[in-house]
Image (cartoon, helix red, strand yellow):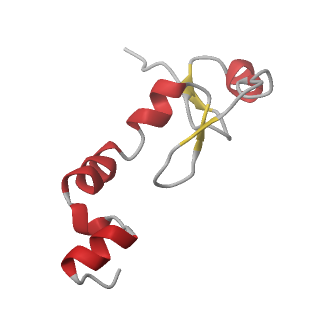
Amino acid sequence: MKSKERYQCGICEEMHDNYYIAADCCDRVSYWYECAVCQKTHRREEAADECCAEAKAAIEIDPLSQPATPEERAATGRLF
């Protein structure tokens, strides 16, 4: 049984069954969505949301990974 060959878009890295579809994949995209962590662009908003999901969750969980606001600095003595 021969495995089906897959082709990857050079821009968004999405896999396709057809070489020509992969080659034209991102040529027709009019709007891009950017990952907030790594700034990689995605064709779909869901893909941008899922990109670096573990890192985004860690940032949301760990308040020290976020810069302190001026109010937090005054209240806690935190420098940054």
Asked if 1 appears above or below 27 in the picture, the reply is above
| Horizontal relation, residue 4 to residue 65: left or right | right
Residue 23 picture location, percent across and down: 75, 28
| Horizontal relation, residue 48 to residue 29: left or right | left
Asked if 78 appears above or below 21 in the picture, the reply is below
Q: Is residue 68 visible?
A: no
Looking at the image, how many numbered discs can be counted on the residues?
Answer: 0
Quarter where residue 26 is shown: top right
* Residue at the (42%, 20%) spot, across then down: 3
Residue 37 picture location, percent across and down: 46, 54
* Residue at the (80%, 27%) spot, across then down: 27
Residue 62 picture location, percent across and down: 20, 60
Residue 21 picture location, percent across and down: 70, 18
* Residue at the (29%, 78%) spot, across then down: 74
Q: Quadrant of the C terminus?
A: bottom left
Quarter where residue 51 is shown: top left
Residue situated in front as seen by the camera: 31 or 7? 31
Residue situated in front as seen by the camera: 27 or 57? 57
Residue situated in front as seen by the camera: 75 or 20? 75
Q: Is residue 35 visible?
A: yes
Quarter where residue 1 is shown: top left
